[in-house]
Image (tube, rainbow, N blue to C red):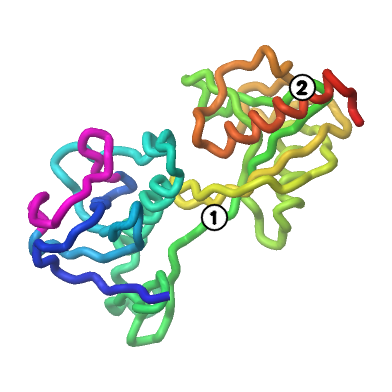
Amino acid sequence: MNIQSQFNLTGNEKGYWFVSKNGRLWLPNGQVPVGTASEFGFKDQLSQPIGEWNGQTAWLICKEMNEAMSSIRPLLNDEDPSLFNMAGRAVQLAEFYRSHKYCGYCGHEMYISKTEWCCMCDHCHQRYYPQISPSIIVAIRHNNKILLAKHVRHNQDNLYTVLAGFTEVGETMEMAVEREVFEESKIKIKNIRYIASQPWPFPNSLMMAYLADYDSGDISIDKSELVEANWFHYTALPKIPEYGTIARRLIEDTIVLCREYDEYGDN
């Protein structure tokens, strides 16, 4: 992969401008701005092309703007999920560059590789890559009901969602699914199958999404993680995650399976 180095803009560069610092992105009027560098006062700013979106160059500038710095969550609602993914790349790279200016082994200044997304040290030859934390998320069906939980971090929003967690060292993704479900709810599951994935840059997860069926056990929650968890009939769901999230897709897919159960039984 050809990674272009950071350089000072002349003002004539065109494209989409991803301006990021501290996990936030510049979104004037709720959108990623498009135009020339000079239009936005970016002449002489240090920038780097990080890909292409909508047929134009995506430019990263690592700085804080005076206003309109925002979470990239609103971009989940865009019809094209690749915009959210590119914004996630920008936010994660900006944070990666901020935290890897100097080598953690020898303390010397590092530079950005021209062949891959990494920072390199000329002194001790160490390479550092952006951290990506593999995570699982799973929707569990029991006949015509779905297991939904209110997480501690979502308590004030009264939001219910499916179970999720990080993969541990030495685990397969499927092992992580079984372990996380049992740790958080004390139930056992079966028929685990992979559905899709979604980059989740809050701050650096890659969500691997699964469906599973209930096997055995009674719900007993881990109170350090969950406020409550229950089986919900697919026609009487509580507040659930917004469209654009992989959690919402899993819930929607499970609703289809619940309807099929009501119509055809568990065949």
Q: Quadrant of the C terminus?
A: top right
Quadrant housing residue 4: bottom left
Q: Quadrant of residue 57?
A: bottom left
Mark 2 surroundings within 10 Å by alpha-carbon count, few (fewer than 14), some (14 through 19), many (20 or more): some
Q: 142 or 172, which lies in front?
A: 142
Query: Would you place residue 26 above or below residue 122 in this image?
Result: above
Q: Quadrant of the N terminus?
A: bottom left
Asked if the residues shown at circle 2 and circle 1 are in contact, with their CB atoms under 8 angstroms apart, the answer is no
The residue shown at (42%, 34%) is 77
Horizontal side of residue 202 vs 178, given as left or right = left
Q: How far apart in space, not on screen, are marks 2 and 1 (Cα)?
A: 34 Å
Residue 144 pos. (x, y %) = 79, 21
Q: Secondary structure at mark 2?
A: helix
Q: Residue at x 70, y 34 (%)?
A: 139
Question: Can you give x and y, in whole percent of width and height, for residue 91 in the image?
Answer: 35, 52
Q: Position of residue 147 (x, y in %)?
A: 72, 26
Q: Nearer the N terminus, badge 2 or badge 1? A: 1
Q: Which residue is disc 2 drawn over?
A: 259
In the picture of the structure, the residue carrying the numbered disc 1 is: 133
Q: Nearer the viewer, residue 267 or 24?
A: 267
119 up-or-down from 266: above or below:
below
- In the drawing, does residue 133 fall left or right of residue 185? left
Q: Tell me the amino acid under the disc marked 1.
A: Ser
Drawn side of residue 180 relative to residue 238, left or right: right
Q: Which residues are magenta?
A: 25-42
